[in-house]
Image: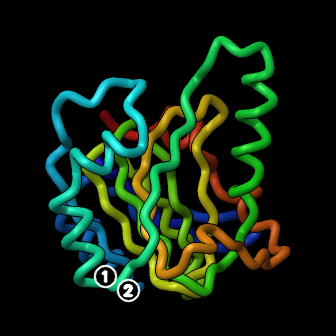
Amino acid sequence: MTYLTVYTDAEAPETLLESQDDAEIAATLKEIDVILRHWQVADGLGPGAGQEEILAAYRTEVDRVIAEEGYTFVDVAQLHPSDDPDWPEKAAAARQRFLAEHTHDDDEVRFFVAGSGIFYLHVNGKVHAVLCEPGDLLSVPKNTTHWFDMGTRPDFTAIRFFHDDDGWIGAFTGDAIAQRIPDYDTITANRPT
C-alpha cells in the first residue's frame, strides 16, 4: 500500500502529514503536479523475470502511457539481494547514486512491479516522501527537485519511461536535505500497519 509522509524542509524537519489513504495521497500529490496511479499487478512474474517478460506482462498499460505522454524509451530497472559476496558494496553504491537531491530535464515516471522504494519530492518548502510498492505508477514532472531511496537492502523491480534514449541523467543540487529527512529504512520500520 502506498504511504505518504510530508515533512517541512527545515533544519529540524517536522512531520506535517502521514497517510495511507489513496484519495488523500493523490490529492496531496496533485497539489505539486505529481500523479499517482495504480495498475493491477500482473500474475505469474517470478523473481527472475527479465525485461522482455516484464514489459510483455504490462504491454497494454505501457503502450497507453507511451501514447498519452509521448515516451520513446522504456526499460526495467531491477535490484535484488544476491549471494554475490560483493552484493553489499554493489547495493550501497547503487543506493548512493540516487540519494543526493537532483532534478532531471525529463519526467521521472516509474511503475513498481515488485518491491518498494521512496521518492522524496522537495517542493514549496516541503518534502513529500512517497513510498511506492507493487502496482504504484508515480509520475514526477521534469525539473522537480527530488531524490530516491531504495533502502540498505534494495529489492525492487520498476518499469521506467523516458522521452529520449539517454535515460537517467541527474543534475545534482548540492543541498544536503536528504540527510535531514528520515530515510527508507526509518520510514518503513515506523509506518503504521
In this image, 19 relative to 155: left or right?
left
What amino acid type is highlighted by mark number 2?
A: Asp
User: Alpha-carbon distance for marks 2 and 1?
Assistant: 5 Å
Return the x and y of residue 140 as percentages of the image width and height: 45, 76
Quarter of the image that includes the C terminus: top left
Residue in the picture at 81% in, 66% down: 176
What amino acid type is highlighted by mark number 1?
A: Lys
Residue in the picture at 61% in, 29% down: 153
- In this rendering, the answer to whether 101 lies above or below 32 is above
- In this rendering, the answer to whether 61 lies above or below 118 is below
Residue at the farthest right position? 174
Residue in the picture at 71% in, 61% down: 178
- Residue denoted by label 1: 30
Residue 166: name its quadrant.
bottom right
- Residue denoted by label 2: 33
Return the x and y of residue 66 as percentages of the image width and height: 29, 76
Tag 2 and tag 1, C-beta contact below 8 Å: yes
Mark linked to residue 161: none
Residue 53: name its quadrant.
top left
Secondary structure, mark 1, is: helix
Secondary structure, mark 2, is: loop
Return the x and y of residue 172 as percentages of the image width and height: 78, 75
Residue in the picture at 41% in, 85% down: 32
In this image, 174 relative to 87: left or right?
right
Q: Residues within 10 Å of mark 2 (few under 14, many from 20)?
A: few
